[in-house]
Amino acid sequence: MRRFWLLATAASLAVAVGVGGATLALFSATSPNSNNQFTAGTVAIDAQRDMGDGIPGPMYYVTTGTGGTDPNQYPTGYLAPGDGIGAAHTPEGERLHRILQVENVGTLDVKLTKLRATLQSGSKYLADKLNVKVTTDPDGLDVIASGTVGSFIDADQTFSTPIEQAPTDMANLHFWVEFPLDANNSYQGLTAVVSFTVYAEQLAHNP
């Protein structure tokens, strides 16, 4: 009998503690995780002439003085009808072949999507006569944009195939310009100074 009574009392005490606990404050604890950081990525590209000389400057210039380069580099000289017409790797084809190197200097993957030109000074009439094609290869075969120089002025020329770049990637855009053989005397002495601009967009979430 005594043994049974002790067990029953213990059971009653356990129930009382359980009921009474509902009216007390609950213990709690927190553990912070500080210094969480969110940083937006950047889309940025840099475009420089790359003719193997390591000297910055425009792709096309008439004389070494106008190109801002050391002597005996890559001036085009004065244009004559027929200049630039010819296959790649021939003197005629290479005469007006230049390379623009585009580097992804941002932190996000990008795609190069289009090209536009601005007439800085000179003759739109001459720009409308000059033909230009842009390729991704040194043989002039993989054409991603083409037309007259004038057709690029203040008008986006979208690449037929965007060029994807991870950060620090570089892409060579090959420019091939020609002055058609049928250019007449009305073009004599004309000058066109043009700036080419390459556009990039983020690659992620951008079909």
Image (cartoon, rainbow, N blue to C red):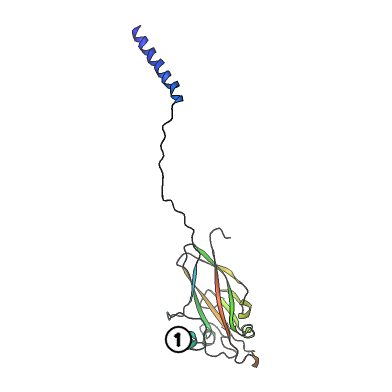
Query: In the drawing, does residue 91 fall left or right of residue 182?
Result: left
Q: Is residue 170 visible?
A: yes
- Relative to 19, does residue 98 appear above or below in the rendering? below
Name the spot of residue 48 as percent of width and height, x first. 48, 76
- Relative to 115, does residue 201 appear above or below in the rendering? above
> Quick one: 36 or 165, which is closer to the camera?
36
Q: How many marks?
A: 1
> Quick one: 67 or 91, which is closer to the camera?
67
Looking at the image, which residue is at 58% across and 83% down? 121
Looking at the image, which residue is at 42% across and 18% down? 16
Position of the C terminus by quadrant: bottom right
- Relative to 188, does residue 118 appear above or below in the rendering? above
Name the spot of residue 2 as percent of width and height, x first. 34, 7
Categorize mark 1 by other alpha carbons within 10 Å: few (<14), some (14-19), many (20+).
some
Q: Amino acid at mark 1?
A: Gln
Query: In the drawing, does residue 152 fall left or right of residue 62?
Result: right
Q: Secondary structure at mark 1?
A: loop
Q: Residue furthest top?
A: 1
> Quick one: 69 or 39, which is closer to the camera?
39
Query: In the drawing, does residue 156 fall left or right of residue 68?
Result: right
Name the spot of residue 90 as percent of width and height, x first. 52, 85
> Quick one: 116 or 179, which is closer to the camera?
116
Q: Quadrant of residue 131?
A: bottom right
Name the spot of residue 60 as percent of width and height, x first. 52, 83
Looking at the image, which residue is at 42% across and 34% down? 28
Position of the N terminus by quadrant: top left
- To which residue does mark 1 refer? 73
Q: Residue furthest left?
A: 3
Q: Is residue 141 visible?
A: no
